[in-house]
Amino acid sequence: MSQFDRKLHRRTLPSPRNGGPQSRHGRPKRVMTVQQALEWAFRTECAQLELPEPPDPEREHGYGFGLEYVLMQRAALGCKIDGGRYKLGDYTHEDAEVIAATVSGMPDSLGGKRMAIRVAELARAGLTPDWMPGAVPRCVPLEMKRNRHGDHATTVVVGAERVLSRGKWRTVEVRACPVTFSPYPQQIEAARRDYLAWRMALRWVRDGLQVGGMLRDIEIVVGLPKANPWNRG
């Protein structure tokens, strides 16, 4: 995977008296892209996904409440959790919980639980999917061997020919070097499809956080990772 230097630059929006958004503490909200917010939630705040458990046949009439429901009820009641700038003990910032709950609700059309776990894991590691930058299929020997003269491509017998050598007919082997393409074009295409699927998932999370309006101290901006970073032109 490829790791990029994405320090969480948190610029300050205009002060409330000038029309900028205000946090619950009366301070301007911290501004982040969705990728920065995910890394902050899962890497810094160590938020955890709340994925639904498989159905239990023995609890046909049981009902559970997800983190989204708890947060909605908390918002309706006006309850707030006091938090600071730094993480203390096992406390997880409320905004990080909201972000984790949003990721947990990833729709099946975007990969469902599998994609939610992937988004969280990449954010926790501070990585983006490896879209194989600079990868070009190259024709290479299928196998190499080494002897005292160095490395050589392995050859195989593909036939035999009769040749006239020094006045005598001789049978000689016809050898060829099996080759392959590395990486396969399909590998590159699959890696880049995976990157685009991850980017679509981030866009869904971003839109959900912006529309939901449940973040108290963070403002999510429009920015997303590049759509096709392999197309430099």
Image (tube, rainbow, N blue to C red):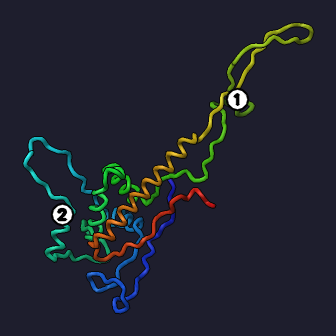
Identify the image quadrant of residue 180. top right
Q: Nearer the viewer, mark 1 or mark 2?
A: 2
Check disc 2 and give the amino acid type: Tyr
Residue 157 at what x, y percent from top left?
Answer: 69, 18
CA gap, disc 1 and disc 2: 67 Å
The residue tagged with tag 2: helix, strand or loop?
helix
Identify the mark nearer the N-term, 1 or 2. Answer: 2
Q: Nearer the viewer, residue 76 or 146?
A: 76
Residue 194 at what x, y percent from top left?
Answer: 46, 50
Q: Nearer the viewer, residue 59 or 176?
A: 59
Residue at the image point whose x is 50% and y is 58% from the top: 3
Q: Quick check: 43 above or below 141? A: below
Residue 16 at what x, y percent from top left?
Answer: 34, 89
Q: Residues within 10 Å of mark 1 (few under 14, many from 20)?
A: few
Residue 29 at what x, y percent from top left?
Answer: 34, 80
Picture disc at residue 147: 1
Q: Quadrant of the C terminus?
A: bottom right
The residue tagged with tag 1: helix, strand or loop?
strand
Identify the image quadrant of residue 79. bottom left
Residue at the image point whose x is 73% and y is 21% from the top: 175
> With 163 as the anchor, is 232 left or right in this view?
left
Check disc 1 and give the amino acid type: Asn
Extreme residue in the bottom direction: 17
Q: Which residue is mark 2?
A: 69
Q: Quick check: 193 above or below 69? A: above
> With 222 as the anchor, is 155 left or right in this view?
right
> With 227 as the anchor, is 148 left or right in this view?
right
